[in-house]
Amino acid sequence: MKIIIDGKEIEFSPGQTIYQVAKSAGIHIPVLCHQEQVKPVGACRVCVVEIEGARSLMAACAMPAGDGMVVSTNTERVRNARRIIVEMLMTQGHHNCITCESSGDCVLQDLAYELGLDAPRFDGPATLLPGETGNEMIVRDMNKCVLCGLCVRACNEIQVNLVLDYIGRGSNSKVGPPFGQRYEESNCVFCGECLRVCPVGALYEKQGRFQGRTRDLEKVRTTCSYCGVGCQMDVRVKNGKIVKVTTDREGMPAPNFGSLCIKGRFGYDYVHHPERLTKPLIRRDGELKEASWDEAAGFVGEKLASIKQAHGADAIAGLSSARCTNEENYLFQKLLRAVVGTNNVDHCARL
Amino acid sequence: MAGLAASFGSGAMTNSITDLGQSDCFLITGSNTTENHPVIATVVKRAITQRGAKLILADPRNIELAKFATVHLRQKPGTDIAWINGLINIIIDEDLLDSKFVSERTENFEAVKEAVKKYTPEYVESITSIPGEDLIEAARLYAKAGAASILYAMGITQHITGTDAVKSLANLAMITGNIGKPGTGVNPLRGQNNVQGACDMGCLPGNFTAYLQVANEEHRRKFEDAWGVELNPNPGLTIPRIIEGAGAGTIKALLVMGENPMMSDPDLSHVEHCLSKLDLLVVQDIFLNETALLADVVLPSCTWAEKEGTFTNTERRVQMVRKAVSAPGEARNDWEILKLLANKMGAGWKYATAKDVMDEINNVTASYKGITYERIGKTGIQWPCPTLDHPGTPILHGITFTRGKGLFSVTEYVPAAEQTDEQFPFVLTTGRILYQYHTATMSRRSLGLVSRTPEAFVEIHPSDAKELGIKPGDEIEVSSRRGSITLKADVGKRVEKGVVFIPFHYSEAAVNRLTIAALDPVADIPEYKVCAVKLRKCA
Ligand code: SF4
Ligand code: SF4
Ligand code: SF4
Ligand code: FES
């Protein structure tokens, strides 16, 4: 089947939305309330497009592509519609980009810029809500919420933690845990999926606050160090310090496709804990005292050699670690087998 | 994972995490998945809520997943073989088995068929207290599902009969043909990030990499050639035997890399006694953990964020770990420390980077041959991956089992090593919680994680609490024949009457002071999941 978008003929398979087909062909349609892992709801209408023969503009994220459809994604009519929506969103809340954690990584900011909106034509709300900072993981700043509902759908459809929902109706409507509870009072397990998909600065990492904006941080793709799922994540670094752990809003690989749990997303700070060991220690007169690497390794080497000579290699054993890398585990058993000469090597798989 | 290896020829997860999403029915047992493998739990919960998949949960505790279960079998701790054999018996009895699969792909079915006959729903109920009709419903759900997947973890293996329980699960999958296809399988969920990798890399007393055998001359020769030395043909000792050996004076020196036996092993007072007898205890770690406190030499190592290398996840996927920050002070990579020690002993190792080590692994390990750093730059590859253009293997045992034919094994229910009595009337079972990790060396030094569960607790059923006059938050002394610990009461219906649960992460209330060092005879896995205790409210 074929569709024409902005004059370009594109093949598609049934079930694909106009947004998906356009994206596959490299045509940019902005989206705000849409993310690839949740069901499209067509709520924000930022993604509207013109379809030949249709009277009203259509939300590309929710509209299935049809055979022979002719679509325009960037006409003046489309841009005007988007402008009004974005201006409304900008004035519904307090979007103070100056100290916002998401500045430079914000869908709303990008849209306003892309659509050339100097200053919104509407007045902003009078009330400024206090930020919710009661837990160590996630801060909520509802002044910036654009009610896209992505956090609600991520919590329910991706993680299936069933914590977040819409509360109230119309202009009073809000998102959050039931009964107006704070995150820490609810059943929230702090997986941070809501934070990951939030397109603006309404949800952000508490420990990363003022530590460096996302776009200014180094990004190192790695594997979680906690459980056996092996989630892929990005460690974000500034000045040699981990500022936060993030996953891209879309396009993350198996096995977790961007989802993490509290340990992976928020459990990294042990790395910089003051109790980290920084020097080799040798027990002298009953106490562990600092030593040089050469001393410590020399001591171990000699002691192992003399035990091997006196009692045989099988008087020596090693416990390796399910937390170390493959390379380290490989060398560990090689050390015991090829250098010491024993097969007394095990790790805590059984524990 | 000796059980699965005996049945199928490989002890690893048969299917993949993503593939679980295609399952029509899950049997989850001994795995508190939402807390221990949270992201795998999301795949399961999505399949249930979005595709209508069914969940059979077999767990003594009323865990989070119970909310999503079609049937919840709450077996008495330590009775797994009984209910699994019960399911098999019902499936044979109601002729719900996949006879074609059984005859073409497996062997020894008749023996199992005979052996499970006595596990009638009534008999199973008398052992497990699972109502007969629930067992029948579970059997039908599992056997009639298009594709059914079994997930299990330490709750199955940490018993004296753990190996046999796993074989029973393998039997169950085989009689229904739920192996080698999408959405099926027998899937052990490995607890720590690189348990699979540590096993694959030969950190086992009887195996080289990829499970080649130390005692097999041909296999040994291969490594003698690769390493240029003569190798010891005698399989070594498992952890519990090593600790015992230390106590008995036959083991004189112990090297510990990133491990904490003074928290993780059963019957800790005994472990401490044994370790104190060593002539040399060397610990490589990132913190001065409970074991390091006893050491003669402590060597500071790096966290995952400070090094390059690979981890192999529970679905056999080898993935990159990359250096994000520098290590503090003089801390070094574990592989560099090992190189230093080896060279002090005259080995002459020349590895300059972790990649050099991986090159050697590729050369000596058939299943990792095609898994190079270049190839896993963007996404990991699942072993076996025998060549440089092989895409990896998401599902094992597709056309044949790794061992050829799937082997049915006869298993019998044996009561737990320690039964409750008048003096110790409660069953203690142990495990992990979402907010902490293993011996908590890392997670208890994380602000966010600590804020969620700052202290140790014991879960007690409300009616037991009432009888003993215990209120939520009371200090409770829990004692077994081996020791006692004091911690806060968490009264609730997550546990059944007569059972208490304690997470094992907290050193000030280390539950392994209570647990029993009874071992599964094949796998040497301690029976953490069952021992007898008594409770006393502290004044
Ligand atoms: S952190 Fe996770 S559980 Fe908590 S509200 Fe967000 S998505 Fe839901
Ligand atoms: S908090 Fe963020 S994700 Fe949730 S509705 Fe508001 S803007 Fe959308
Ligand atoms: S983020 Fe959570 S689920 Fe993923 S690997 Fe880490 S600990 Fe496991
Ligand atoms: S992105 Fe399409 S309606 Fe919001």
Image (cartoon, rainbow, N blue to C red):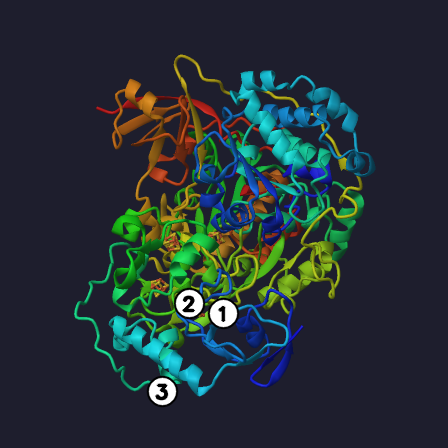
| Percent of width and height locating residue B336 | 54, 61
In the image, what residue occupies the spot 26% across and 71% down? A92
Residue A326 seen in the figure: yes
Q: Which structural element holds mark 1? A: loop
Q: Quadrant of ligand 1?
A: bottom left
Q: Answer yes or no: disc 2 within 8 Å of ligand 4.
A: yes
The answer to whether residue B213 is left or right of residue A200 is: right
In the image, what residue occupies the spot 39% across and 50% down? B443
Numbered label attached to residue A33: 2
Q: How crowded is the residue under tag 1: few (<14 C-alpha within 10 Å), some, or many (20+)? A: many
Numbered label attached to residue A61: 1
Quadrant of residue B178 within the rendered picture: top right
Q: Which structural element holds mark 3? A: loop
**Chain letter of disc 2 in the image:** A
Task: Tell me how far mark 3 sits from mark 2, CA to CA.
Answer: 20 Å
Work out whether residue B250 or residue A53 is closer to the camera in this orientation and state it: A53
Lower sequence index among marks 3 and 2:
2
The kind of residue tagged 2 is: Cys
The kind of residue tagged 3 is: Gly
The answer to whether residue A103 is left or right of residue B430 is: left
In the image, what residue occupies the spot 61% across and 56% down? B317
Task: Tell me how far mark 3 sits from mark 1, CA to CA.
Answer: 23 Å
Q: Answer yes or no: disc 1 within 8 Å of ligand 4.
A: yes
Residue where numbered disc 3 is placed? A116
From the viewer's perspective, is residue B286 above or below residue B88?
A: below
From the viewer's perspective, is residue A209 above or below residue B464?
A: below
Mark 2 touches mark 1? (CB < 8 Å): yes
Residue at the farthest left position: A126
